[in-house]
């Protein structure tokens, strides 16, 4: 009974591409890897106490208070993702390239009095624009033999749960997966034993899965910041993130050794997309007790997505040894509306300056991923929300960066570490590992114009299960990403 319950939870979690929202979906839209200007990217985003960069609207808006003039920035970016997998002794690789806009922004600064006045608010800056927060472009290829199970085994385990479902109701109850397999003849009902069977109860198939994802979270920011006596800087951002996420997968099983009677191959296609727009608020402070040090802090409210919506559809086909084959079976088109609340964030920062020659800075970000919650009118997310609370935690997230000036040139470097959000170290679905980033860049600053370039490399690992993890081994994934960003800016 425990195994059946486990499989039911697993299937509802969409690891074989069902439509219900999952703990992994909440994590995907909560775990942010900030993009922005090249200066910000080259220093790994460790700008919480440095300021005077448009990207700080997404981390610590008090950075606006350090602006001394108006500014326009524009940052095109080139992104490449390279994924390798190892499954049952077989290795696969895949890659995807993407061109996007990482940032654009406008800042206007005006002074409230004479620059040398004592005390009070010396300047106010207002800003609006966009910073990219996540890039979902990736491809994954997994392949290898399985001599112990098939995807169909997880289907029959569900159908054989007592009381056994009437064959007439299979398509109605499971229109996006099990019902398609039943209509393709991959699963059949044995009326004598009152159970569902498949032609490959012990595997013996070569399995492949190709996953293609794309989309992003882009946040439109409106902010205001100020400078109090060149000692204390403050800021407030209204963030409006927009989510676009697309997922396509093709799963196949092939009888390469012609060892399974009747069966040759099956193919299961699944398409899924998510859209939504949210809102959050960010407030921050930067304090400069001396010219050589700045201390910063920021608080981000949870992001509330009041109207997330999903579209999804699937199809399945099978080829048999006989001339009698089933036509491709299509699911209906599914759609679902719901709400999402991502976790609260807090960022603490410090920066050390060596005159006007350069700085070294660091950020610590606190975010507890077990605070994410789904909501729906029918209150159907109790189990998923309980899973989020039980399986995620607040990991160690740190960023360290540096910048040095050589006349009109700038040299930069940075390192980022985003700890694993997995609280148990062995989640039943995917073990989400830590992510490392290393970055560097250079720039040219010529009075009213500046141009910067940044390169950032990141690495992460994860375990990926093609279906029920009690039946199949994980594929070990290594994901490497490379991004190159150029920023062009004008001051006036």
Image (cartoon, helix red, strand yellow):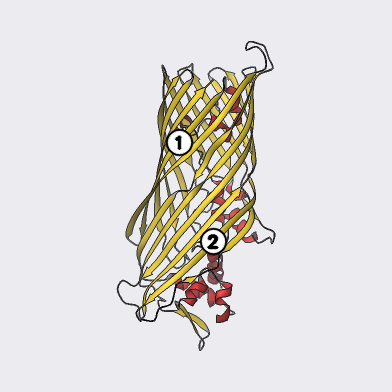
Question: Crowdedness of circle 1 by 10 Å Cα count: few (<14), some, many (20+)?
Answer: some
| Residue 135, x across and y down, in percent | 48, 45
Q: Where is residue 329 in the image (x, y as percent from the top left)?
A: 48, 72
In this image, 402 relative to 378: left or right?
left
Q: Nearer the viewer, residue 449 or 45?
A: 449
220 in relation to 393, above or below:
above
Residue 415 is left or right of residue 55, and the answer is: left
Residue 52 image position (x, y, % from top left): 55, 25
Q: Earlier in the sequence, mark 2 or mark 1?
A: 1
Residue in the image at 55% along x and 81% along y:
167
Q: Determine the residue located farthest toward the left in the rendered image.
A: 257
Q: Callout 1: helix, strand or loop?
A: strand
At which x and y percent is residue 132? Answer: 52, 40
Disc 2 target residue: 312
Q: Distance between the residues labelled 2 and 1?
A: 31 Å
Asked which secondary structure carries label 2, the reply is strand
Horizontal side of residue 339 vs 361, given as left or right: right
């Amino acid at each position: 009974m425990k195994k059946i319950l486990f499989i039911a939870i697993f299937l509802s979690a969409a690891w074989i591409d069902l439509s219900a929202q999952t703990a992994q979906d909440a994590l995907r839209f909560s775990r942010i890897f900030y993009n922005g200007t090249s200066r910000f990217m080259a220093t790994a985003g460790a700008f919480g106490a440095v300021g005077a960069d448009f990207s700080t609207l997404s981390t610590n808006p008090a950075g606006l208070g350090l602006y001394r003039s108006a500014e326009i920035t524009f940052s095109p970016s080139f992104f490449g993702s390279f994924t390798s997998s190892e499954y049952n002794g077989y290795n696969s690789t895949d890659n995807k390239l993407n061109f996007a806009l990482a940032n654009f922004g406008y800042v206007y600064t005006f002074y409230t009095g004479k620059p040398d006045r004592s005390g009070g608010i010396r300047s106010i800056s207002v800003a609006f624009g966009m910073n990219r927060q996540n890039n979902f472009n990736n491809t994954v290829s997994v392949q290898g033999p399985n001599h112990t199970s098939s995807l169909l085994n997880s289907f029959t385990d569900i159908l054989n749960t007592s009381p056994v479902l009437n064959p007439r109701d299979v398509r109605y109850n499971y229109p996006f997966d099990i019902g398609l397999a039943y209509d393709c003849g991959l699963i059949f009902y044995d009326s004598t034993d009152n159970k569902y069977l498949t032609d490959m109860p012990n595997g013996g198939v070569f399995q492949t899965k190709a996953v293609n994802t794309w989309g992003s979270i882009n946040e439109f920011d409106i902010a205001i910041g100020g400078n109090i006596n060149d000692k204390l800087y403050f800021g407030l951002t209204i963030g409006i993130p927009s989510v676009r996420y697309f997922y396509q997968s093709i799963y196949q099983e092939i009888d390469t050794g012609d060892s399974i009677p009747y069966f040759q191959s099956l193919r299961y296609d699944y398409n899924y997309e998510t859209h939504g727009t949210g809102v959050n608020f960010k407030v921050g402070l930067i304090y400069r007790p001396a010219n050589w040090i700045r201390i910063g802090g920021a608080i981000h409210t949870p992001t509330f997505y009041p109207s997330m919506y999903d579209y999804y559809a699937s199809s399945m086909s099978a080829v048999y040894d006989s001339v009698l084959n089933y036509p491709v079976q299509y699911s209906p088109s599914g759609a679902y509306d719901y709400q999402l609340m991502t976790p609260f964030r807090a960022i603490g920062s410090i920066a050390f300056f060596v005159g006007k020659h350069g700085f070294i800075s660091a950020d610590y970000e606190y975010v507890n991923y077990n605070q994410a919650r789904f909501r729906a009118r029918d209150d159907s997310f109790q189990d998923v929300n309980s899973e989020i609370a039980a399986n995620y935690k607040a990991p160690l997230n740190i960023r360290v960066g540096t910048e040095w000036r050589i006349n009109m040139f700038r040299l930069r470097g940075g390192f980022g570490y985003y700890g694993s959000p997995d609280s148990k170290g062995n989640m039943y679905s995917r073990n989400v590992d830590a992510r490392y980033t290393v970055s560097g860049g250079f720039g040219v600053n010529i009075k009213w114009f500046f141009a910067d370039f940044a390169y950032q490399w990141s690495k992460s690992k994860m375990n990926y299960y093609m279906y029920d993890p009690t039946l199949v081994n994980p594929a070990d994934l290594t994901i490497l990403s490379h991004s190159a960003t150029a920023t062009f800016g004008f001051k006036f």
